[in-house]
Image (spheres, grey):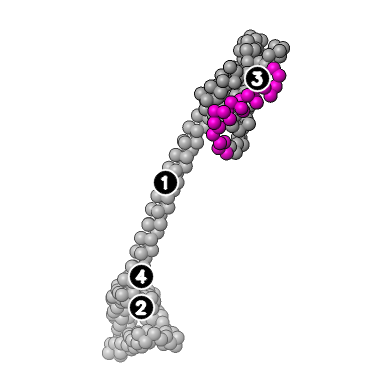
């Protein structure tokens, strides 16, 4: 509010005018009649008030006149000079008079501060709008900070969960790799061992072709890798018993000596024929008989 600056300026101006008038009357009253001294003091104060009123009128209109301002400061300097001259001529209490000699200049400075206040003063509605804008900006900043903190906490939680899951997967893979490595090592030792070779030979000897010399069995370790899909076989037509007997007879005697049932069955399946194991074995018995 403007009264916060105008009241000190008015009080300082009143005190300065009273002091100026009193000093002029006391100082010049000894050299001339006191009514004349009173007129001189009132002239100084009146000139100061007139220029001050004109400055306030221009300030209310948003205008400024440098000449009027210069005249007003001149009256202030004159009043301060009168107080200083009186203090220097008084033998007693000179310090006290010098202490108050700055009051006219202080009053002018307070009016200058008041004019600057008025230039920058805003209406209550404008101040309310500014407060609302600042409050809205603070609210938005607080919401943005809260959102960023929440997103950071969520991302931290997600990264922690992903890291822990990855660590668990890595541990499981490591244990699985160790188990597979041990199993692979045992399989390779079993394949390369002499006892395992003789055992495999004894197992595979009964199913080797007749007349084939015994050979040392050699089995290979399974190979892990991508598997190519095998195309599906078309459904073979169902053979009658007579047709099945003819096919079995042909396959059995396709090689000399005649093939065993296992070899014949393998070639029968490889040729694309379709028959259940019961029918195929029954046809084999009929052909052999």
Q: In what element is the residue under mark 3? A: loop
Disc 1 versus disc 4: nearer the observer = 1
**CA separation, marks 4 and 3?**
106 Å
**CA separation, marks 2 and 3?**
123 Å
Disc 2 versus disc 3: nearer the observer = 3
Q: Position of residue 60 (x, y in %)?
A: 35, 85
Tag 2: Cα neighbours inside 10 Å, few (<14), some, or many (≥20)?
some
Tag 3: Cα neighbours inside 10 Å, few (<14), some, or many (≥20)?
some
**CA separation, marks 4 and 2?**
18 Å
Tell me which label, 2 or 3, sits earlier in the chain: 2
Up the image or down, 73 lies above or below 244; here it is below
Q: Residue at x 68, y 14 (%)?
A: 210
49 sits left or right of 280 in the view: left
Marks 1,4: beta carbons within 8 A: no
Q: Toward the viewer: 213 or 155?
A: 213
- Residue under pointer 4: 130
Which label belongs to residue 259?
3
- Residue under pointer 1: 153
Number of labels in the image equals 4
Tag 4: Cα neighbours inside 10 Å, few (<14), some, or many (≥20)?
few
Q: Is residue 243 magenta?
A: yes
Where are the magenta residues, as a range? 234-258
- Residue under pointer 2: 118
208 sits left or right of 21 in the view: right
Q: Position of residue 25 (x, y in %)?
A: 30, 83
* Res 266 seen here: no
């Amino acid at each position: 509010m403007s009264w916060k600056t105008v009241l000190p300026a008015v009080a300082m101006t009143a005190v300065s005018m009273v002091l100026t008038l009193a000093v002029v009357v006391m100082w010049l009253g000894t050299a001339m009649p006191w009514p004349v001294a009173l007129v001189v003091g009132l002239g100084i104060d009146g000139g100061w008030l007139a220029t001050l009123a004109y400055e306030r009128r221009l300030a209310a209109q948003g205008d400024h006149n440098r000449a009027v301002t210069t005249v007003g400061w001149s009256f202030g300097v004159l009043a301060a000079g009168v107080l200083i001259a009186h203090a220097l001529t008084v033998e007693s209490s000179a310090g006290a008079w010098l202490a108050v000699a700055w009051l006219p200049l202080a009053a002018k400075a307070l009016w200058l501060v008041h004019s600057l206040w008025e230039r920058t003063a805003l209406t209550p509605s404008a101040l309310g709008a500014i407060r609302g804008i600042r409050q809205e900006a603070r609210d938005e900043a607080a919401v943005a900070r809260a959102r960023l903190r929440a997103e950071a906490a969520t991302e931290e939680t997600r990264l922690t969960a992903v890291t822990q899951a990855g660590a668990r997967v890595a541990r499981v893979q490591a244990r699985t790799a160790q188990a597979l490595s041990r199993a692979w090592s045992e399989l390779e030792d079993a394949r390369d061992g002499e006892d395992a070779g003789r055992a495999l030979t004894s197992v595979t000897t009964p199913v080797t072709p007749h007349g084939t010399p015994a050979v040392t069995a050699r089995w290979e370790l399974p190979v892990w890798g991508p598997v190519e899909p095998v195309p599906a076989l078309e459904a073979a037509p169902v053979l009658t018993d007579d047709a099945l007997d003819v096919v079995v007879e042909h396959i059995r005697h396709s090689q000399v000596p005649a093939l065993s049932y296992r070899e014949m069955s393998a070639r029968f399946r490889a040729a694309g024929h379709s028959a259940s194991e019961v029918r195929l074995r029954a046809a084999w018995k009929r052909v052999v008989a």
